[in-house]
Amino acid sequence: MTESRKIARSASLISFATFISRILGFVRDVVIAGFFGATGLSDTFFVAFRIPNLLREMFAEGSMSSAFIPVLTETRIKKGEEEARRLARITFTFIIIVVGSICVAGIIFAPVIVRVIAPGFTQPEQLATTVLLTRIMFPFLLLVSLAALTMGVLNVERVFFIPALSSAWFNIAIIFTIILLSSHLSRPILAVAIGVTVGGIVQYATQIPLYLRKGYTYGIDTNFRNEGLKRMAILVLPLTLGLAVSQINIFVSTILASFLPQGSIAYLYYSMRLIQFPVGIFGVAMGMAALPALSAHAAKGDMES
């Protein structure tokens, strides 16, 4: 099978998995809307979710994935499997320390962060609920970062379907958590936040067996002077700045919507989900499928292919 056909086949698998995930994402949103509507209560969740989710889109599944795959591919081709596995362990350790610290800081300073992103939230109860939801969901950032690392490794190994399907499990976890827990909590909206964190655990856990099967292991390696990690850091900076432009638009929109009538942030969220649907199925799928192959050709100096 030619390289172009392999990429097309991989893109088809990713598109199918992404389609399933997006459909389940819509089901998740329908469940949230059915339980909480477009109200001030749902606004508190969408503001709280926006904070770790914004960081996820910029770092975990954005710049880090795009930087990690080319560097790991080059390391694997030029230095061998063992060095590639070591780079994965170093990156794992780096994520645990750096992203873990960001999560701890986010939990501690959640009141300040919420006031910045939703200055229109002036009611004490609404503000307190948003802060609590933010604190519950911040660990999701660490979990999804580890999931993105695992996905990157599997993509380099040309495994696409299971990693692409992992976000479907994330949505399923949220749906079931809402259905099972919301009626048993004093503040039912907490069920959605708990579902996000549980979903992050499931999204990561579903990829671990394949990760281990490919010969990669977990362990602490603090050799942060590793050449591969340095190259990743160089690549991450411009990618993050590029992604920050689109995220700033979302950030500003959320700030403005916080001053509008209750439910406005929920309407904004649902409309953005509709816009992102076709991009996620087609554009992202092709990019995910092509990046490992293009990285391999670049590492070999085969620029013509």
Image: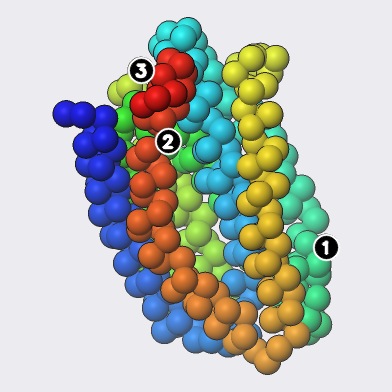
Identify which amino acid the numbered label 3 is placed on: Gly
Quarter holding residue 237? top right
Residue 102 on image: x %, y %: 72, 44
Mark positioned earlier in the residue sequence (2 or 3): 3
162 to the left or right of 250: left
Label 3 crowd (10 A; few <14 / some 14-19 / many >=20): few
Is 166 or 267 nearer to us in this picture?
267
- From the image, tell me which residue sits under label 1: 112
Q: Nearer the viewer, residue 104 or 120?
A: 120
Coordinates of residue 39 in the picture (x, y in percent): 58, 87
Q: Is residue 127 visible?
A: no
Report the residue at 42% width, 35% height from top. Answer: 291
> Can you tell which mark lies on residue 215?
3
Q: Amino acid at mark 2?
A: Leu
Residue found at the very far front of the displayed protein: 304
Q: Please report the residue visible at 50 percent of the width from the left and 59 percent of the height from the top.
A: 196
The picture quadrant where one finds residue 160 is top left
Q: Choose the circle earlier in sequence order: 1 or 2.
A: 1
Q: Is residue 215 above or below residue 171?
A: above
Which x, y percent locates residue 228? Answer: 59, 18
User: Mark 2 and mark 3: span between their CA atoms?
Assistant: 22 Å
User: Residue at 26% across / 30% down in the picture?
Assistant: 3
Label 1 crowding class (10 Å Cα cut-off): few <14, some 14-19, many 20+? few
Q: Secondary structure at mark 3?
A: loop
Tell me how far mark 1 sits from mark 2, CA to CA: 38 Å
Residue at image x 49%, y 34%? 149
The mark found on residue 291 in the picture is 2
In front here: 291 or 119?
A: 291
